[in-house]
């Protein structure tokens, strides 16, 4: 069985690749059906369709790639908690946002899916 850390790294790589292709539906599919996403300056988003709509809006707004940098992963069997940083860039490779995140992951079989995703910008308000 793949460790939580390795499974999450693989999922994060797929997340970034799928984002770079501009596939908001594919990114949302990496979340559990009952996911919750807690972005800056917004209410809690519930479920994949809401996550897909937000991500599509970000993509349409010019965010072309996301880099996910894991700082730590705590493994609790079928659940794991990841703390890390994200960097969002535009088509020119310029940083649009830089921040931090906490993700609660759920393992479904051998696949790790984002279940609760909390993000905060590190840029000044």
Image (spheres, rainbow, N blue to C red):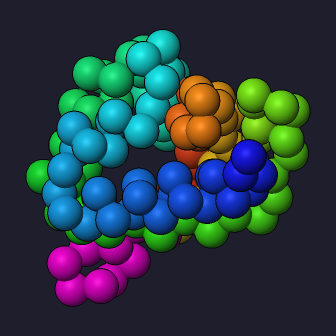
Residue sticking out furthest to the front = 1
User: Can I make out residue 34 in this image?
Assistant: yes
Quarter of the image for residue 89 reads bottom left
From where the camera sits, is residue 61 visible?
no
Give 19 or 92, whichever is nearer the viewer: 19
How many numbered tags mark residues here? 0
Percent x, y for residue 18?
29, 57
Residue furthest out toward the left: 60
Q: In which quarter of the image is residue 15?
A: bottom left
Residue depicted at 45% across the width and 32% down the height: 31
Residue at image position (47%, 64%) is 13
Q: As drawn, is 75 to the left or to the right of 65?
A: right
In magenta segment, residue 77: no
Q: Where is residue 108 in the image (x, y as percent from the top left)?
A: 58, 27
Q: Which of 122 and 49 is in front in this view?
A: 49
Q: Which residue is drawn at 22% across and 38% down?
A: 25
Q: In this view, does 47 lie above or below 56?
A: above
Q: Which of 39 and 2 is in front in this view?
A: 2
Highlighted range, magenta: 83-97
Q: Please give the name of the residue rendered at 42% of the width and 17% of the height, measured from the top-left corner.
A: 33
Queried whether the magenta region covers residue 90, the answer comes back as yes
- Classify residue 42 by image quadrant: top left
State the predominant SS element of the stretch in magenta.
strand
Tell me where residue 71 appears, x and y as whole percent: 77, 64
């Amino acid at each position: 069985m793949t460790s939580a850390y390795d499974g999450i790294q693989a999922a994060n790589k797929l997340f970034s690749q799928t984002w770079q292709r501009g596939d908001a539906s594919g990114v949302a599919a990496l979340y559990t059906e009952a996911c919750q996403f807690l972005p800056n300056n917004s209410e809690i988003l519930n479920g994949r369709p809401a996550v897909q709509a937000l991500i599509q809006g970000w993509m349409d707004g010019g965010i072309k790639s996301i880099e996910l940098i894991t700082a730590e992963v705590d493994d609790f069997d079928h659940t794991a908690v990841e703390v890390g940083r994200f960097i969002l860039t535009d088509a020119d490779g310029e940083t649009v946002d830089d921040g931090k995140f906490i993700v609660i992951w759920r393992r479904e079989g051998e696949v790790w899916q984002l279940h609760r995703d909390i993000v905060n910008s590190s840029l000044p308000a």
